[in-house]
Image (cartoon, coloured by chain):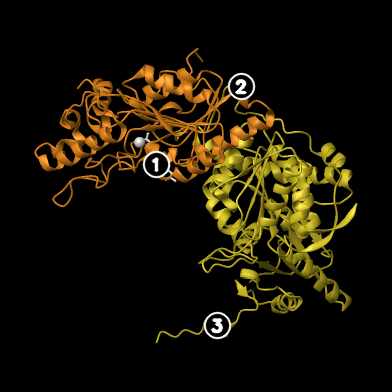
Amino acid sequence: MKQFFEGSHAVAETIRLCKPGVISAYPITPQTHIVEDLAKIVADGRLNSQFVNVESEHSAASVVLGGVAAGVRSYTATSSQGLLLMAEVIFNIAGMRLPLVLTCANRSVSAPINIWNDQQDSVSLRDAGWIQLYAENIQEAVDFHIIGYRIAEDKSMMLPVMVCMDGFILTHGIETVDMPTQEQVDKFLPPYKALYKLDVDDPVTLGALVDPESYMETRFAIHKTHEEALSLIPKIAADFSKSFGRTYNGLIEKYRLDDADRVIVAMGSVCGTIKDVIDELRSKGKKVGLLKVTSYRPFPAAAICDALKDVSKVAVLEKALSLGALMPLATEIKSAFFGRKKSPKVISSFVAGLGGRDITKQSVKDVFRLLTAKELDGEFIDLKPELLKENYE
Amino acid sequence: MSDMHFNSGHTACSGCGQSLGARLVLEAAGKNTIIANNTGCLEVFSTKYPQSSWGVPWIHSLFENAAAVASGIESALKYLGKKDSVNVIAQAGDGGTADIGLQALSGMLERGHDILYVCYDNEAYMNTGIQRSGLTPFDSNTTTSPPGSHSMGNIRPKKPMPEIALAHGIPYVATASVAFVKDLQRKVKKAISIKGPKYIQIHVPCPLGWRHQPNLTVPVSRAAIECGLYPIIEYEFGKLIAVQRIRQKPVEEYLKLQGRFKHLMKNPDEIKKIQDIADNNIEKYGLRLESQ
Ligand SMILES: Cc1ncc(C[n+]2csc(CCOP(=O)(O)OP(=O)(O)O)c2C)c(N)n1
Ligand SMILES: [Mg+2]
């Protein structure tokens, strides 16, 4: 049934439908509404779950690590500094092959402290071994959590999934959402059956010391699984479409790409704004399009190359940096095309929306305007040069 | 896997007090136990892949989070309706307990989880090569508290971990020693019979770090207790219900057994300071045998 939902509320209701037995989180803006809603859902008896109020994000991640290691579906959510404080545990969860789902309410990273949206937090943890899915809107945020548990708990995966949703824009925004029913979710997402767990009737040792004889194989195995995820994610997404009637590819989405000669590549909620601009420009006869990257990890290099190979100019627009280097998403897209016969003539890279600066339709139009034969590396959109004047007096 | 819950064949140093302590704890707790272990010597010497000494479900995640991981396990067991039949133990070294893991431990104690937390106190970061921790004793020579022309070693006395645990209002807090096996195992059994968070801190000598003969592990720990430097105490529901009374021996008897205090041997002023610590303990907990 379609209803108006605040993004956080919709996610909390979705998590209720996924029935985690252990929930643990620590408050941080803009993630708070999700866990507050879940606390109330549990307090009202609408979900049978252990809600563990911890003293830090490090412990929140550790609690859900313990919960899922004991064989129970578990859930946590965080943002920004919280995700960074979890970082050690985040790597650990993937290394231990524990299938968690975490919501990252994307927020900038301090300093300077800033509570607004960009994607620096989750992008900084791209190498941790988690699958990362970026939602464009609240409906996707809802659906990706359900899909996320299915992917994570698939016996061929056993990897954690981070569902990234732009802070405030999606967590506090209100949209109509088609909220799945419990029956639909139950049918799509069977109860979690652990491949290995802490069980006194069948004792195992988890988290052993692994020396140079075997360590590399454990890392290789995760890498390999990510490769396999590239084919599994679209399969699970297709399965989802059958039950829920909403179609996703799970890796990428092509928007008006067919004859496009100028295309923006982006992740998350900005794709909505880009689509509006594209519709506007298309009505004026401009051949523009969008390639939305849904799965940042695994990185769908082949699918991206295939989608963009006939496009002449590509703009990669991102909300995160790799300070001191080329922009993270642009780097990967360029490297994906290296050595390929068919590739865009220009791949320009743009940064916008850091620390919550609005990416307006005009910002997107500026990107298209700057997407010319001259390739740009890390062009900042809507930068205020007047704030950059230095004065050491 | 043999019937033992903590099996031999691991790579601990000879005379390792912690391996002895861990075996005694698990023997007392029994097979229906799940363990979460911090990083440290115990984790390293007992689980070198593909072997493991553990005959019970055991998990190691990180250096500072065993208390939180155990909280998650306990919550999962509650969710499954299995908590009453399974003991959850979180265990760590002194560094993993008193320093980097203190926050997670405090959270676990405050939340009231039904978990026994065991601190194996070998009084330094042994796994990384004998650096000082918050539980390293006063004047002890470690690699990061070396004596020199401007220092006599570790500048502070031990952090009062049992009191810190106690201040959380938890139902059971005790100290124990590998030199007193029956007492140690009785305390573990008692702790797991009580619902809620429990804290036991066990004195476990480290021959390598303390620089004593490997065959002196038990006598060294016994000497610490007999001179009053390691009070053996037991609190139930906030009340001190038992202490191990001693015929007090001078602290030199303990210090002289170990290389980590060698630099004090010709320095009566420093030894006096350590004697004061022991005397204070004896006073504070009423450790003196009446008959003396
Ligand atoms: C976050 C982090 N910091 C530092 C280390 C390095 N480290 C591993 S074990 C250890 C010392 C452990 O000391 P303790 O808890 O007393 O246990 P012991 O080895 O003495 O039994 C240190 C410093 C680590 N693994 N993780
Ligand atoms: Mg130690």
Under mark 1, the amino acid is Ala
Of residues B247 and B144, the one drawn nearer to the viewer in this rendering? B247
Q: Which chain is yellow?
A: A
Position of residue B274 measured from the top left corner of the image (x, y, whole percent): 20, 39
Query: Identity of the amino acid at label 3?
Result: Leu
Label 2 resides on the chain identified as: B
Q: What's the CA distance linking mark 3 and mark 2?
A: 64 Å
Callout 3: CB less than 8 Å from ligand 1: no
Q: Amino acid at mark 2?
A: Ser
| Mark 2 or 1, nearer chain start | 2
Please name the residue shown 57% across and 57% down the image.
Answer: A124
Pick the quarter of the image with the C terminus of chain A.
bottom left
In the rendered view, tell whether residue A132 sits above or below residue B98.
Answer: below
Residue A157 against residue B156 in the figure, above or below: above
Residue A20 percent coordinates (x, y): 71, 39
To the question of a shared chain for discs 3 and 1, the answer is no
Seen as rendered, the residue at the extreme left is B266
Q: Which chain is orange?
A: B
Report the disc number at residue B85.
2
| Residue B98 marker | 1
Q: What residue is shown with label 3?
A: A387
Q: Residue furthest top?
A: B3
